[in-house]
Image (cartoon, grey):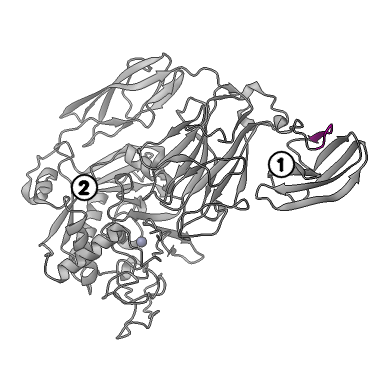
Amino acid sequence: MMKFPPIYFFCFLILTCSLNAQQVPCYFDEYTNNESLSDAERQIQEGVQNILSGNRTMDSVRAIPVVVHIIHTGGSENISEAQVQNQIQVLNEDFGKLPGTNGFGLGVDTEVRFFLANLDPGGRCTNGIVRVNSPLANHQSYQRALLKELSFWDNTRYLNIYVVKSINGNVAGYSSFPDGPPEADGIVVRHNYFGNSGTANNFLGRTTTHEIGHWFGVFHTFNNACGDDVCTSGDFICDTPPQFEPNFSCTTKNTCSNDVPDLNDLKENYMNYTPGSCKNMFTEGQKIRMQSTLNEIRTEIWSADNLLGTGYDSVYMPPVVCPVVAGFVSLTRDICFGNSVYFMDISLNDATTWQWSFPGGNPAVSNEANPTVIYNTIGTYDVTLIVSDGASTDSLTIASYINVGSPGIGDALSYSENFDDGLYPPAGITINNPNGGITWVLDSLASTSGMYSMRMDNYASICCGTVDEIILPNLDFTSISPDPEIYMSFNWAYARSDPSFSDELLVLLSTDCGTTFAQVFYKTGNAMTTGPTQTTSFVPDSTQWKSAFINLDEYKDETFVQVKVVNVTDGGNNLYVDDLYIGNGSDLVSASEIFVEGASLKIYPNPASDKININLDLPEKEMISVKLINAQGMLLREIPDQDFMAGQQQLYFSTMGIPTGVYFVVLEADGHRKAVKVLVQQ
Ligand SMILES: [Zn+2]
């Protein structure tokens, strides 16, 4: 079966030498497997047929409740309520083809409208805006599930929009596709692309229009280039002329000639990459796809019941001012004593004063909006927040919110795990699978040592942002000599299932019982691949592995180190990990195996820098070959078969031009083979 790519739309920006920022293609806009449509795509296409055949109507105007979560660090990215309202206005102009506005163009009224929710999921009055002061304002796309842990309203009832300070540095925004998992649902937009006022200075607020088009299941007009057929490939819409590539200007172009009549590309279309100033339309076909998504997948969000429950403007009489609603969140709830917790206020309706109480914490009370609290005593503690805006007051207590444990001393180094005892979970390892879905498993099809490796099946995984972790036992880095240095190495294998997206591999390290983690290793995209892109489930052969080497010397004084190997799925393809090692390399030299009766072998130094010394002590004359191979099995150096005399033999391999990584010195004599792992560190 072919693999359907997970659908996440990233819209990048790069700065060019011109005065204008230029938008470059969305990260994940390739949609190549037209024969293998996802369930969501199939549902949308069936829904389109239902509308065209008259079985389903496009109901009169459907309203979508919106909640805007502003993730900020206290700067101008904490945009005003007026800017949020302005973006909602722009959406209604664009989707409604409102006369007298920029949205009144060549296209149709999609009969979709947007309003800021007037009632929250608890039925309480709100302005539809949640503000969170968090470092996640500088957003990395692999952290998208974390945004939902900060603040998330039921996605069957609300369109969740996250406004952030930055996305991967230079991305304007991205959106999920219909029918993804809740932790992937919603839209993330950079604040300076959000609306057309305040801090916004790009694309007239049409970045959000574009992303919501994706959220409704509409593709780029240039999807799949010219396609094979103007209706059944490309963007699957007949009345958007096929388009070979995105257009970054307002210049008229005609990049495909397989449409009859041969029409120009729609530079005016919101799903193109043209500047906001020349965009003004959705087509009838795009409208039908949106309405199909609302008929078939996003069915509850516009229902009469939900409009009542979220306070749709025409059926809800809001008070003049909504009273405050207390709320807080912390991304850390389990810590060790002596560590601190960052609490974030997520109260609704603009509280102006905060009274926190932290039994067991220091400080025990605080009037800050976002306090940091140290816990010095083992136990389980409640947290209370009382907020006020002067006119109204609200209080929230969450019992047993913080668990404080003991750090202890970690296991002595070195640590190694090759998974070959077949235990699951492997001894001392915790598998963290927060969403309870597909996670790391033992795999016997591929390994760099013995029988087993660990495999994360991103191929079967649906989509995006879910984290699965291999958490190693806590380790005591002071238990071993830091000379020459403490490092971590492991082997991994990965192939993509589509060239335009990728899963992610990280190694995170904590010295404060998991309160905070440093990222010590990160791979995605081409840097992560060890095998060719393939639409079938990836099983690496022995040449399709890479070795990781991570210098951890800066942690040599830590007695309680938590290390975890993390997969962030993008619904791509399988990731394998094998032969984890943390230590100083001194124990990697093993001379216990017998390859020549009575011989001894020493390989040093390990890690090696400019050369690898091989000291061989033979009881009698022997014909031996010595090879240096990399972790992918490629031959790098060789001393071919030759007769060595009895006694001490001193050989070496130069490591000039050999990159840092794990290698093997392989000796063969009379059919017996011995391999010694050596770390090369340049
Ligand atoms: Zn896009």
User: What residue is shown at x 18% (from left), y 39% (from top)?
Assistant: 121
Q: Which image quarter is the N terminus in?
A: bottom left
- At numbered mark 1, what does the secondary structure look like: helix, strand or loop? loop
The earlier-in-sequence mark between 2 and 1 is: 2
The picture places residue 498, in percent across and down from the top left corner, at 46, 60
- Label 2 Cα neighbours within 10 Å, binned few <14 / some 14-19 / many ≥20: some
The Cα atoms of the two marked residues, 2 and 1, are separated by 52 Å
The residue that mark 1 highlights is 681
Rendered image: mark on residue 156: 2
> Is 524 within the magenta?
no
- Label 1 Cα neighbours within 10 Å, binned few <14 / some 14-19 / many ≥20: some
- At numbered mark 2, what does the secondary structure look like: helix, strand or loop? loop
Three-letter residue code for mark 1: Gln
Region in magenta: 596-603
The picture places residue 611, in percent across and down from the top left corner, at 80, 43
Is residue 401 positioned above or below 200 on the image?
above
| Left or right placement of residue 648 versus residue 32 in this view | right
User: What residue is shown at x 84% (from left), y 31% (from top)?
Assistant: 598
Front residue of 413 and 446: 446
